[in-house]
């Protein structure tokens, strides 16, 4: 019998592949620090977006996979680069003038435009932590400001001063000639203005840990590199942090991939061992542009959670991390239904398949049972034809389709019904475009209507007159067979053209549910009424 660890060591699921790479670092000896450190980085220059969440979600999946194949303890550190200077003012926050007045100051020294925290950086940090806590992540939060000002980085900053030339040699090779003339890996914090200065160094005193420079007005200053008086440029900061904390794994977006040799080189110059990396593809908005904190394009975590449960977002993050993905409203229904499909499949799978199933990684090896007996896409269509204004308007139909279901026994379904009504009214209803059928389509729909009327009349007759196979006829499969047969008999080729016609004429959309399942959920007599209205042109807006 295959054990979980044996299966994990052979799994092709990407979290296990990455976990095995991390484990290989310690095949000769365990880590001296006593644990394996996974890290994620976050720049709080704007409101957190889903890409930030994705790094923590995916790193957590790799961490959990590692814990299956190894007994070495693990930690996950979520590090905020909140001492970075605010170089741009985000477009999607209030009090723009206040922020412009504090440009170039460390984010934890910029006033909070929302008036809730003592700085903009701390506001965004709090938002990130709230989002991560919503998903139940196990992590430790770290602030660059706290690490720099408390002295936690002092020893490494002194080493940066000592090995300044080696760090600069790595950096200068990556810069244009003009930039080389003014570049320094050290960024002093101006003692008077509090701004982060991008100025060249006149002198680096490695023995005493001092830097000398001229500010933007030509005045000379000398500052210690320790105690939060100076920080590192972001690329050297990456490598310094890896060396200081002995980071074993960090992932980042494809836009960082060309910098990997720089990060690694600086880490090694400072005596560290470069971590394992994982580069993921970027998330795109509806126009195919990279999502950005400063632009505020793409979806926020709160926006996704207004229309679907947290697990659907985790499922979206699991899928093909090395493929660029469009992150827009219309991906939500698909993510919900695919997540529950995988959840239903999990219970019957052998362990080798279970650990390759996304839900294993979403739930840390303990996925729940799915009770979403009606697909989310079907609930959206039901919300449309039923004219439901809240989830209670859907439950009468759901009860007929699944008599055993109640909001109490099927909380996933109850929540999904509420999400579906909201999603329909916000995104689907404004785009509905009904049309009349062509002559060929009308003939087929009238044939289907006739058969449904016959079925409705027969199954509602006196009990002794009801056919013994009535349950089969009224089942989702039985109704689907009927719809399928009508399309074939009326010469639709390919058959998808028949179903597209049903969706466009009856539902106002070019795509839709398995139509037999829709009839079973909505009801035969209700579907008859819907078809009669549609064929008479009653669904088309004047």
Image (tube, grey):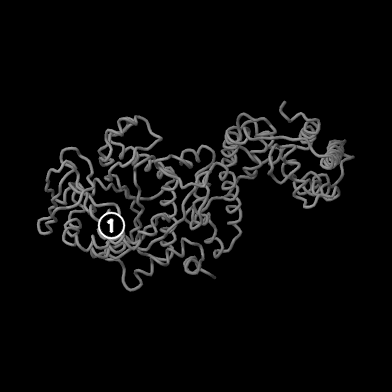
Left or right: where 360 falls relative to 189: right
Residue lying at 27% horizontally and 41% vertically, measured from the top left: 104
Q: Mark 1 Cα within 10 Å, few/some/many (few <14, many 20+)? A: few
The percent position of residue 296, horizontal first and vertical second, equals: 43, 39
The quadrant holding residue 113 is top left
Residue lying at 49% horizontally and 48% vertically, measured from the top left: 284
The percent position of residue 136, horizontal first and vertical second, equals: 42, 46
Q: Which structural element holds mark 1?
A: helix
Q: Quadrant of the C terminus?
A: top right
Q: Residue furthest front?
A: 178
> Where 169 sits versus 138, above or below?
below
Q: Residue furthest bottom?
A: 28
Name the foreground residue: 252 vs 481: 252
The quadrant holding residue 193 is top left
The percent position of residue 233, horizontal first and vertical second, equals: 26, 52
* Residue at mark 1: 177
Q: Quadrant of the N terminus?
A: bottom right
The percent position of residue 77, horizontal first and vertical second, equals: 33, 53
Q: Residue furthest right?
A: 465
Left or right: where 368 falls relative to 157: right
Residue lying at 83% horizontally and 51% vertically, measured from the top left: 488
Left or right: where 162 falls relative to 429: left
Number of numbered callouts drawn: 1
């Amino acid at each position: 019998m295959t054990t979980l660890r044996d299966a994990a060591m052979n799994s092709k699921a990407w979290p296990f592949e990455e976990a095995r790479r991390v484990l290989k670092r310690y095949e000769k000896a365990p880590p001296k620090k006593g644990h394996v450190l996974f890290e994620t980085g976050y720049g709080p220059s704007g409101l957190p977006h889903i890409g930030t969440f994705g790094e923590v979600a995916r790193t957590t999946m790799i961490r959990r996979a590692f814990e299956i194949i190894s007994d070495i303890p693990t930690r996950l550190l979520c590090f905020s680069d909140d001492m970075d200077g605010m170089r741009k003012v985000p477009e999607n926050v209030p009090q723009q003038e206040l922020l412009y007045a504090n440009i170039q100051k460390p984010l934890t020294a910029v006033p909070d435009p929302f008036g809730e925290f003592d700085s903009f950086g701390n506001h965004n940090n709090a938002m990130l932590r709230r989002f991560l806590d919503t998903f139940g992540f196990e992590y430790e939060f770290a602030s660059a400001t706290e690490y720099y000002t408390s002295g936690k980085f002092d020893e490494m900053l002194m080493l940066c001063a000592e090995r300044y030339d080696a760090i600069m040699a790595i950096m200068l090779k990556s810069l244009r000639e003009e930039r080389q003339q003014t570049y320094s890996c050290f960024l002093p914090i101006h003692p008077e203005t509090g701004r982060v200065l991008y100025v060249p160094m006149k002198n680096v005193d490695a023995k005493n840990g001092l830097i000398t420079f001229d500010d933007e007005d030509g005045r000379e200053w000398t500052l210690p590199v320790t105690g939060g008086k100076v920080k590192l440029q972001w690329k050297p900061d990456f490598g310094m942090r890896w060396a200081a904390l002995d980071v074993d794994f960090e992932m980042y977006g494809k836009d960082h991939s060309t910098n990997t040799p720089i990060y690694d080189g600086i880490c090694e110059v400072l005596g560290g061992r470069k971590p394992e990396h994982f580069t993921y593809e970027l998330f795109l908005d509806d126009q195919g542009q990279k999502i950005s904190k400063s632009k505020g394009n793409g979806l926020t975590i709160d926006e996704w959670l207004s229309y679907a449960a947290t697990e659907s977002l985790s499922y979206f993050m699991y899928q093909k991390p090395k493929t660029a993905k469009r992150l827009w409203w219309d991906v939500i229904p698909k993510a919900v239904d695919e997540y529950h499909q995988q959840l239903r499949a999990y219970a019957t799978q052998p362990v080798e398949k279970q650990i390759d199933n996304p839900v294993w990684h979403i739930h840390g090896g303990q996925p729940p049972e799915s009770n979403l007996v009606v697909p989310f896409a079907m609930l959206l269509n039901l919300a449309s034809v039923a004219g439901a204004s809240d989830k209670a308007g859907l439950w009468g139909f759901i009860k007929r389709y699944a008599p055993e279901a109640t909001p109490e026994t099927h909380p996933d379904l109850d929540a999904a019904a509420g999400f579906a009504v909201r999603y329909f009214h916000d995104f689907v209803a404004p785009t509905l475009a009904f049309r009349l059928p062509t002559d060929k389509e009308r003939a087929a729909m009238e044939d289907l209507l006739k058969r449904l009327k016959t079925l409705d009349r027969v199954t509602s007759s006196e009990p002794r007159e009801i056919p013994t196979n009535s349950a089969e006829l009224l089942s989702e499969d039985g109704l689907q067979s009927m719809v399928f047969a009508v399309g074939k008999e009326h010469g639709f080729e390919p058959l998808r053209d028949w179903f597209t016609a049903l969706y466009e004429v009856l539902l106002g959309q070019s795509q839709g549910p398995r139509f037999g399942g829709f009839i079973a959920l909505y009801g035969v007599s209700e579907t008859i009424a819907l078809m009669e209205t549609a064929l008479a042109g009653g669904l088309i807006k004047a």
